[in-house]
Amino acid sequence: MRVTTRDVQRFKAQGERFPMLTAYDFPTARLVEEAGVPVILVGDSLGMVVLGHASTIPVTMEVMLHHTTAVVRGTERAMVVADMPFLSYNLSGEQALGNAGRFLQEAGAQAVKLEGGVRVAETVRRVTEAGVPVMGHIGLTPQAVNQFGGYRVQGKTEAEALALMDDAVALQQAGAFCVVLELVPDNLAKSVTERLAVPTVGIGAGPHCDGQVQVIHDLLGFGASYIPKHARRYADVAEVVRGAVSRYAGEVREGRFPDEV
Ligand code: KIV
């Protein structure tokens, strides 16, 4: 049985901090689940860390479905949350519901995540009422990077902080089972976490959120040219890959690989 939205809400009720991590393919998803992570996000960050785009904006529904399907195949117990890509939920409630449904029906995800607060609350209501669990995402919402003018901390002024609180409450009222807070000052993340009955999941939002989420490439030191300040590197996979590949290449050149059969 997979982790459900009720389990995620129970984490908060029982004061249990929980990890969430991105994965974009079958073997990584399998390893992340084996390591005990209960919620896996197929983030549209894959556009940047896997596909090499400068932002998440070029990511399409087809790309997200493709990667979500692989992550679902690599897992048995984790909840798989699929990110709804840029403009896949903003045109109308029908469009949002149709696309959200594809993640459950075609890719086998258990929930979707979409960016925005008050402005998407009606969409969240529409999608959740149809039976698709929704994770909200406010603060720095990367799909709006061109509007923000960069990846900056949000909610620093009193007016911004009040607006962010309104966004969080609107998402909860619309039925979101969980809310991601990205690049939000610690004290604001703490207030939102205390105010909401549903869990908050922080990224660059300090230690007071109910859960934490990170992009796995940042954690593993795998290929990312830019590591955000809030990330902590737990491994140097780039060095492991470089070392192994250059040993292989050297052995081929020197005639030491393969062995005689
Ligand atoms: O796309 C993503 O990986 C995300 C997380 C950073 C929250 O949205």
Image (cartoon, rainbow, N blue to C red):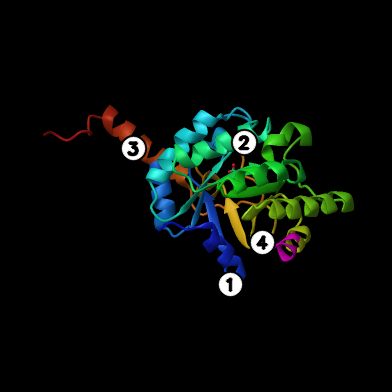
Amino acid found under the numbered disc labelled 2: Ala
Residue type, numbered disc 3: Arg
> Horizontal and vertical percent for residue 5?
54, 57
Residue underneath mark 2: 96
Please state which of the two labelled residues, at mark 1 or mark 3, is closer to the viewer.
Answer: 1
Amino acid on which the number 1 mark rests in the picture: Gln
Give yes or no for residue 196 being in the magenta stretch: yes
Q: Describe residue 256's horizontal placement relative to residue 250 as left or right.
A: left
Tell me which label, 1 or 4, sits earlier in the chain. Answer: 1
Give the spatial CA distance, label 1 vs label 4.
Answer: 14 Å
Q: Earlier in the sequence, mark 1 or mark 2?
A: 1
Nearer the viewer's eye, disc 4 or disc 2? Answer: 2
Q: Which residue is mark 3?
A: 247
Q: Amino acid at mark 4?
A: Cys
From the Cβ of disc 2, is ligand 1 less than 8 Å away? no
User: Can residue 188 be seen in the rendering of this structure?
Assistant: yes
Q: Nearer the viewer, mark 1 or mark 4?
A: 1
The residue under the point 80% across, 52% down is: 166
Relative image position of residue 104 (x, y in whole percent): 48, 42
Foreground tag (3 vs 2): 2
Q: CB under 8 Å between callouts 4 and 3?
A: no
Nearer to the camera, 111 or 72: 111
Residue tagged by mark 1? 14
Alpha-carbon span between mark 4 and mark 2: 28 Å
Q: Which residues are magenta?
A: 192-198
Camera-near label (1 vs 2) is: 2
Specify the quadrant that holds the C terminus. Answer: top left
Quadrant of the rendered image holding ligand 1: top right
What is the secondary structure assignment of the residue under circle 1? Answer: loop
